[in-house]
Amino acid sequence: MALSCVHPGDTAAALTRLRGIFPQLYAASSVLDTSLNNANPVIHGSFLLFNATRLENGEDYLLFGTGVTPQVAHVMEQVDAERVAVVRACGVPAHSELELLNSFWSQPQNSLYDVLHNTPSYQVTRGPKTLSHRYFTEDLPYGLVPYLKLGRKLGVDTPVLSSLLYLLGVYMQENYAEQGPDLVNLPLSRYLLQESSS
């Protein structure tokens, strides 16, 4: 599990104090690294677009088993490629969704679809049964929208992500692109290591 202090120069000391209790912690480059290299929003947002009626109907199904087909996984990869481009534009080391998920498990897989279908823990995960779910209320406005806003701020095109958020917004009668944190005036360099050590 990655850890960073708001002032990255303090991270090493924090890890020294915490490692005895949480040996799984390792140093991330910054809080932007821990925040922007997040595996959940890309998977959950893409999943929602193609499975929203299952939630609306209260169906019982496997989140990744029946909810993620090869084509849905392909969309996830396209959204993730845009996320990675935004993260890199922020000056932060970027890890793909596949790299992130492979880092959690002992048997790395060759594709996102394979990780979601061949990892035992994912094979038993049930999908949500209601539209009043954190995948909508958290993962869209606070998970995916920040990439959209940072992309606009830094001149990175995110057409697939924009389309995903637009269509989910139409479905839910929400304007997700206007929700989430205001990042227009966020001074990204304040949170990077080279800035804190100068």
Image (tube, rainbow, N blue to C red):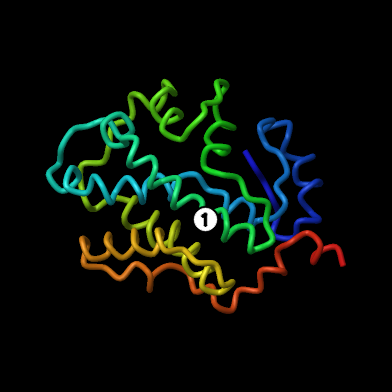
Q: In the picture, which quadrant includes the C terminus?
A: bottom right
Q: Position of residue 107 (x, y in %)?
A: 55, 21
Residue placed at 43% from the left, 49% from the top?
Answer: 42
Q: In the picture, which quadrant includes the N terminus?
A: top right
Residue placed at 85% from the left, 63% from the top?
Answer: 197
Q: Position of residue 105 (x, y in %)?
A: 55, 26
Residue placed at 65% from the left, 43% from the top?
Answer: 2
Residue 63 vertical placement versus 147 (above, below): above
Quick one: which residue is furthest to the right in this view?
A: 198
Residue 89 vertical placement versus 54 (above, below): below
* 38 relative position to 15: left or right: left
* 198 relative position to 121: left or right: right
Quick one: which residue is furthest to the left in this view?
A: 57
* 127 relative position to 198: left or right: left
Find disc 1 in the rendering and name its residue. 83
Along the viewing direction, whichever of 151 and 176 lies nearer the viewer = 151
Other residues around mark 1 within 10 Å, as few (<14) / some (14–19) / many (≥20): many
* 197 relative position to 33: left or right: right
| Label 1: which secondary element | helix
Residue 140 vertical placement versus 150 (above, below): above
Instruction: Specify the quadrant of the image occupied by residue 142.
Output: bottom left
Residue placed at 32% from the left, 36% from the top?
Answer: 68
Q: Amino acid at mark 1?
A: Arg
Q: Position of residue 152 (x, y in %)?
A: 51, 73
